[in-house]
Amino acid sequence: MAFSGPPPSTVHVPARIADLAGDRPLLPVWQNELGGLTFQIGIGDGRLFAKWAPADSGLDLTAEAVRLQWAGGFTPVPRVRDHGADRAGAWLVTHELPGENAVTPRWKTDPGTAVRALGAGLRALHERLPVADCPFSWSIEGRLERAQLAGMQVPADLPAPPTIDHLVVCHGDPCAPNTLLHEDGTWSGHVDMGALGVADRWADLAVATWSTEWNYGPGWEHTLLDAYGIDPDPYRTDFYRRLWSAT
């Protein structure tokens, strides 16, 4: 499985991102497994963050912009400044959101605080975003259909879908780096909302708990579930992790 993380020391800056930065300092801060890059534009207060997705990456930054604009009415997410696309790729520019992501060196040395913030932040997200008003879906059927259209082979041994425990508006990619923390270790907001949509809450919980192992080592899953306020559910966890890997 490929993972996202800090980019290499030398990164090609797309022309559109260079134009957006102008004379302001430009710093690459993140790279995902599909070739997408995130840059910080400027320093201090008023910083901007620009995402770049190469044309062949399959990343839909317009979809993320629309989701951010909707979710921003209910919970802290980055405010969209600009987005667009050309033949080379697509871009999404957002205003700075207070906090730092939960896998900076500081929080990796204090995983207990970080993981509790992940659980509390995910619970707050699920409670604040209104299912009835959400125009986006993250359903099992939709994810499998999109995977097949993209030419991905869905495993034949994927178990039967579990019944719905509780419908919420899921983050869609609730891995640890996508939660931001205040200085005091409480959650401050969420980023990378391109997959946001209505689904069973275990679609998020299964991946969020899995992410604690990737980012902090084994033994933190129950801490996240306790902070969220829910008991473990092995079957739903296994299913949604398999679905995540398959789609």
Image (spheres, rainbow, N blue to C red):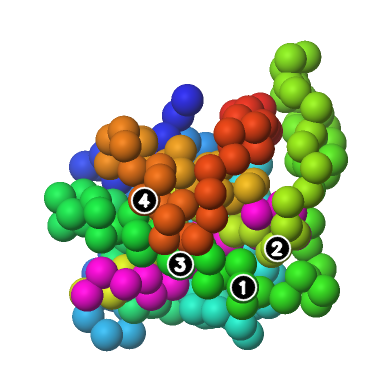
234 vs 137, nearest the viewer: 234
The segment highlighted magenta reads 184-201
Query: Percent from the top left, x then y, of residue 220?
Result: 34, 43
Give yes or no for contact between labels 2 and 1 (Cβ–Cβ under 8 Å): yes
Residue drawn 80% across the image and 27% down it: 160
Of the numbered discs 2 and 3, the one sitting upstream in the chain is 3
**Is residue 122 found left or right of 24 in the rendered image?**
right
Q: Secondary structure at mark 4?
A: helix
Q: Amino acid at mark 3?
A: Gly
Query: Percent from the top left, x then y, of residue 92?
Result: 54, 65
Q: Amino acid at mark 1?
A: Glu
Frontmost of labels 1 and 4 is: 4
Write down the residue under mark 2.
168
Write down the residue under mark 1.
127
**Is residue 156 found left or right of 115 in the rendered image?**
right
Instruction: Judge the density around disc 1: few (<14), some (14-19), many (≥20) Cα neighbours within 10 Å.
Output: some
Give yes or no for contact between labels 1 and 4 (Cβ–Cβ under 8 Å): no
Residue drawn 46% across the image and 44% down it: 209
**For residue 97, which quarter of the picture?**
bottom left
Of the numbered discs 1 and 4, the one sitting upstream in the chain is 1
Find the distance from the CA under tag 3 to the CA under tag 4. 13 Å
Q: Amino acid at mark 2?
A: Val
